[in-house]
Amino acid sequence: MFKVKVLQSETKIFSPEEQFASTVNEGLSLKNKCLPSWLIFDKTGSEIFKKITELEEYLPAACEFEIIRNHKNHISKFITEKQFNLIELGAGDGCKTKILIEHFLNKKLNFHYFPIDISNGAITNLVRSLENNHSDTSLKATGLIGDYFEGLKAITQNESKQNLVLFLGVTLNNMGLEKTRSFLKSLRGSLGPKDFLLTGFDLMKKPKLLYSAYNNALFEEFNLHLLDRINKKLDANFNRNNFTQQGQYNPNTRAVESYLYSTQSQTVSINALSKDFHFRAWEAMQTEQSFKYTLKEIENLAAENGFEVVEHLFDSKKYFLDSVWRVAS
């Protein structure tokens, strides 16, 4: 069984176009201009980022693949019921989770996979690829398009199966501390006492390693694609040749921050907003922020938000961590 469903929200949801326009207007109106990285992710942006994750110097993806491959059997031991749900928040193309799915099928485990993502294209393509490769297996997959918590509610409201929830990658690193706390509190309220959460954290490491991961031709292209998206969606006239990208580790915020620098004094018109935005020569516009955690900070984050750490799963160099949590009793 392979299906895709669009989630119905009980709260007012702004259209993607409205959210995009509002976020750009708000970010460019700040004294220190700042736009969130989710604005970059259309089909082209996602394709560029996938290429970034395949770079040797971009450590989070390679390290997490290693963790999933090496610990897949151990992860399966957290399942204590005959039937369970495998739920993935922000599934994307599901490339890491497919390793677990293969392993669970080989162990003849009875589970239903629910990938949740706001991207219609990502969910549709993921479910289609699973159907193409597993139509002759016992796999059940239902892709949910929409909000994570609406998805969790839809899955859990009428059944009491054990849930293994995956939140892989560096999404928590990229949220910022206050948003992370708010997210985890909401997630804690959506899980039961027999459920487990497997969530990724990029760990603090030598700043030189962080620098090399966020400064290369692909990362610059990824950031410049933000300007292309604004031009296309909001009828703007950004000239990408007048901007250059630089990533740096900020010891005060404990985050890698990426900026687009305006190489000259210029004014950009955004017709859909009926506004002009001025950039001084060498003015910086922040486009990404990825916090790097210590082990103690991760454990404190769990405890502060109603979770207890069950186990930490590391890669061989201890550059990345997939932490297994459950709701604190």
Image: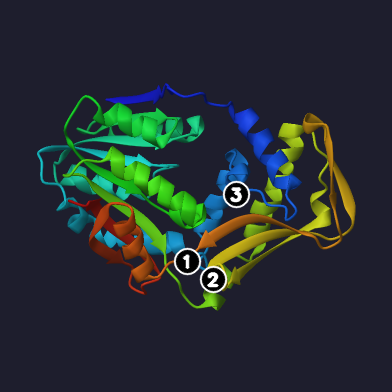
In percent of width and height, residue 258 lies at 64, 61
Of pointers 3 and 1, the one earlier in the residue sequence: 3
Of pointers 2 and 3, the one earlier in the residue sequence: 3
Q: Say which amino acid is labelled 3.
A: Ser
Question: Compared with residue 322, is residue 91 higher up or lower down, i.e. above or below?
Answer: above
In percent of width and height, residue 55 lies at 53, 62
- The tag on residue 41 is none
In the depicted view, which residue is nearer to us: 69 or 199? 199
Question: Compared with residue 80, is residue 131 higher up or lower down, i.e. above or below?
Answer: above
Q: Is residue 18 visible?
A: yes
Of pointers 2 and 1, the one earlier in the residue sequence: 2
**Residue farthest along the front direction in this orientation:** 304
Q: Say which amino acid is labelled 2.
A: Leu
- The tag on residue 37 is 3
Which residue in the structure is indicated by mark 2? Answer: 210
Residue at coordinates 78% horizontally, 32% vertically from top-left?
273
Which residue in the structure is indicated by mark 1? Answer: 292
Query: Contact, CB < 8 Å: mark 2 with mark 1?
Result: yes
Q: Say which amino acid is labelled 1.
A: Lys
Residue at coordinates 60% horizontally, 56% vertically from top-left?
288
Q: Nearer the viewer, mark 2 or mark 1?
A: 1
Which element carries disc 3, helix, strand or loop?
helix
In the rendered image, which quarter contains the N terminus?
Answer: top left
Query: Contact, CB < 8 Å: mark 3 with mark 1?
Result: no
Question: Compared with residue 218, is residue 81 higher up or lower down, i.e. above or below?
Answer: above
Q: Residues within 10 Å of mark 2 (few under 14, many from 20)?
A: many
For the residues labelled 2 and 1, the Cα–Cα distance comes to: 9 Å
